[in-house]
């Protein structure tokens, strides 16, 4: 049985935009829910079954690559597609998510 948790996160959606919200593990689901303001600006939620996660990693700093390039980013890969998040304590969050997504 896994424990549920939630952290503040920014989901990087383009080189120029990151959507603020919360990244949450609830039961067997990973969910990113944008804040109210970002929802109004067309920020969309992300819902992924933990079993569908292929890989969880931490990307190195990538200055000038995107809006969040100065921070190391949490990378969640599902079906060959990578989604990037900026979170505090990225190594700990990555390890917690790896643990939660293992069968």
Image (cartoon, grey):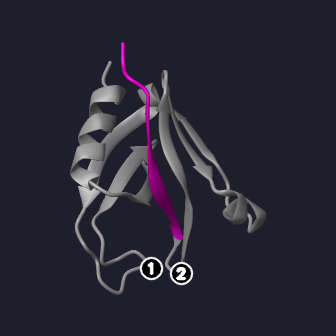
The residue beneath circle 2 is 16
Q: Nearer the viewer, residue 21 or 67?
A: 21
For the residues labelled 1 and 2, say whether their Cβ atoms are less than 8 Å apart. yes
**Could you tell me which secondary element the residue under label 2 belongs to?**
loop
Marks 1 and 2 sit apart, C-alpha to C-alpha, by 5 Å
Position above or below: 2 against 77: above
Where is residue 76? Give x, y as percent.
Answer: 39, 48
Q: Residues within 10 Å of mark 1 (few under 14, many from 20)?
A: some
Mark on residue 31?
none
Mark on residue 67?
1
Residue at x 45%, y 79% (from the top left corner):
67
Position above or below: 41 against 9: below
Where is residue 36? Give x, y as percent.
Answer: 71, 58
**Residue 50, quarter of the rendered image:** top left
41 on left or right of 78 = right
Q: Earlier in the sequence, mark 1 or mark 2?
A: 2
Looking at the image, which residue sits at the far bottom? 64
Q: Quadrant of the N terminus?
A: top left
Magenta stretch in the rendered image: 1-13
């Amino acid at each position: 049985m896994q424990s549920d948790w939630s952290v503040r996160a920014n989901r990087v959606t383009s080189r120029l935009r990151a959507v603020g919200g919360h990244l949450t593990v609830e039961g067997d689901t990973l969910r990113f829910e944008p804040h109210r303001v970002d929802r109004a600006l067309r920020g969309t939620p992300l819902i992924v079954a933990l079993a569908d996660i292929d890989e969880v990693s931490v990307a190195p700093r990538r200055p000038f690559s995107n809006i969040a390039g100065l921070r190391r980013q949490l990378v969640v890969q599902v079906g060959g597609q990578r989604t990037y998040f900026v979170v505090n304590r990225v190594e700990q969050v990555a390890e917690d998510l790896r643990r939660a997504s293992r069968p």
